[in-house]
Amino acid sequence: MNAKKMMALALTAAMTMSMGAALVSADDAVWKIGMIGPLTGPAANYGTSVDKSAQIAVEEINAAGGINGYQIEYRGEDDELDSEKSVNAYNTLKDWGMQILDGCTTSGCSIAVSEKTKEDKLFQITPSGSADDCTKYDNVFRVCFSDPQQGIESAKYIGEHGLAKTVGVIYDSSDVYSSGIENAFKEESANQDFEIVVEEAFTADSNSDFSSQLQKMVDANVDLVFLPIYYTQAGTILTQAFTMGLDTTFFGCDGFDGMLEMDNFQKELAEGVMLLTPFSASATDEKTVAFVKAFQDAFDMLPNQFGADSYDAIYAIKAAAEKQNLTPDMSIEEICEGLKAGMVEISIDGLTGTNMTWSAEGNPSKEPNVYVIKDGAYSVAE
């Protein structure tokens, strides 16, 4: 065989392989779901739980026959809580063949990646991106409450349950999650029977020493301190508040979840802390007990609210895909359009809420829960 003919045959074979990769037959098709979150770094508690919870959901669904009879391949990527790295992770997953994204875990990263998913017409469901702008595009849905929802519901709970007459607030003005909740909390407080008497901010560059902010809470003798922040800063604030003798009620949101699992944190400092979050690993309902056991058996650790949201996200994808009779051999755009239509038609009983539904704007409808930390565990607040 001459060289030209060998080259032609090789070229034909290469083109055939390329077409085979691009045009997957229905028999060989699988769903490819990607996940992006901080698997390392200061917020690894969030991303790790999101990743591992998605793995459990995928394994359960595959064992039960998959989605419309097709198995799921799953892959998680680390963004280290960095928006640029999150976009890089998205590109890695795109090269892998991702059809659906469970992510990103945090708001800033989710917003950055949504620019790419919108451009690529790829369906994105963020388990825990709570900032308003996370769902500004119609291809993006969320499982968690939005920041305004958390702020409003926190203010309502504090007011309706008579927890305080005077309230102090400490928030991160450099963070969209924290400032978004704080703004909504402040607006709703005007409708409640308490007054915000101290309002103190910090930034990412000044998040290790809160003595100045806490001293103002002491001077004002506030009944309650509202902390719409993440668990790492919350742990520092509780530690410093104890050394300063500040004896008051602390109330946070879902960002508090993970505080009890921090290394070297004294759990007794969190006694009596309250938080608004849709999930607690200590809940006794059958679904939560089964999930927590599966998570502990697989990973020897407890899941948090972020993980529960991710677990529900995978099952929401399944429900929406089945509602629209979608198959993985469809195009990315066809899958996206089908899931968008399916999401507003489904109702699921998840870990983070029963009869959960979604609006066309991508927001869930479910009841908030408030927990209080007692003896190092979450208990439903009365």
Image (cartoon, rainbow, N blue to C red):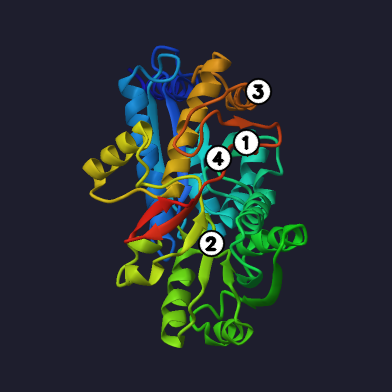
Residue on which the image places disc 2: 252
Badge 2: residue crowd in 10 Å (few <14, some 14–19, many ≥20): many
Q: CA distance from mark 1 to mark 2?
A: 21 Å
Question: Do tag 2 and tag 4 residues touch (Cβ < 8 Å)?
Answer: no
* Residue shown at the point (31%, 41%) measured from the top left: 292
Q: Is residue 338 above or below residue 116?
A: above
Q: CA distance from mark 1 to mark 4?
A: 9 Å
Question: Do tag 3 and tag 4 residues touch (Cβ < 8 Å)?
Answer: no
Disc 4 marks a residue whose amino acid type is Val
Question: Do tag 1 and tag 4 residues touch (Cβ < 8 Å)?
Answer: no
Q: CA distance from mark 2 to mark 4?
A: 19 Å
Q: Is residue 22 above or below residue 57?
A: above
Depth order, front residue of 269/173: 269
Disc 3 marks a residue whose amino acid type is Ala
Depth order, front residue of 370/50: 370
Residue on which the image places disc 3: 341
Residue on which the image places disc 1: 365
Q: Secondary structure at mark 2?
A: strand
Residue 323 in picture, x, y percent from top left: 56, 16
Disc 2 marks a residue whose amino acid type is Gly
Badge 4: residue crowd in 10 Å (few <14, some 14–19, many ≥20): many
Q: CA distance from mark 1 to mark 3?
A: 17 Å
